[in-house]
Image (tube, rainbow, N blue to C red):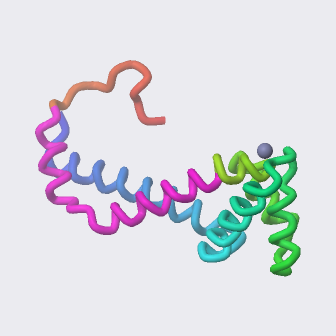
Amino acid sequence: MPSSHEKKRRRELLADFKAQERANFRAAMPISAEILRELFFFIEREMGKTGCNHCPTAARKFLKSHDLNEKSILDWLGEHGGFCDCEILANVREKWESNAEVEKRAARADWEAFGAILDKVPDVPPMSGDELP
Ligand SMILES: [Zn+2]
């Protein structure tokens, strides 16, 4: 059974790993959060008028009018499942919002209290399929 010191260390590693994942997502964003938010608003407005034609038409229009790098941004949106306007809203905005929300929550987390709760969890091997990669 791991010592409480070892448990604490594992907890910190996991918290670091999750924070790193969120930071990577943010760092890989080819545009700022503000512009990204404007892009989502723009697409929403355009789609309200014309619907989605299964191309990133509104996204392209926005990027052009803001003189942004169309290719790298469309590639990034595609990497996150946004290959057309409606997918950008459904997949990328969803991912981006949940990432931002988790970052906000993590910033005000009480890690001591979190640790105290985890300490009550019995120390047994993970169930099959639950192991860390
Ligand atoms: Zn679509």
Question: Taking the image as four quarters, which one is ligand 1 found in?
Answer: top right
- Where 129 falls versus 78 (above or below)? above
**Predominant secondary structure, magenta span:** helix
100 relative position to 87: left or right:
left
Residue 10: % across, % down: 30, 48
88 relative position to 33: left or right:
right
Going 69% across and 59% down the picture, which residue do you hit? 44
Going 82% across and 53% down the picture, which residue do you hit? 50
- Residue lying at the far bottom in this picture: please name it: 67
23 relative position to 50: left or right:
left
Residue 80: % across, % down: 69, 50
Q: Which residues are magenta?
A: 92-121
- Judge whether residue 93 is colored magenta: yes
Residue 130: % across, % down: 40, 27
**Residue closer to the observer: 84 or 29:** 84
Residue 36: % across, % down: 66, 69
**Residue closer to the observer: 68 or 4:** 68
Going 22% across and 59% down the picture, which residue do you hit? 111
Question: In which quadrant of the rendered view does residue 132 lie?
Answer: top left
Question: In which quadrant of the rendered view does residue 121 lie?
Answer: top left
**Residue closer to the observer: 68 or 128:** 68
Please identify the quadrant where the N terminus is shown. top left
- Judge whether residue 45 is colored magenta: no
- Where 90 falls versus 71 (above or below)? above
Going 14% across and 55% down the picture, which residue do you hit? 113
- Residue lying at the far front in this picture: please name it: 49
Give the total of numbered labels: 0
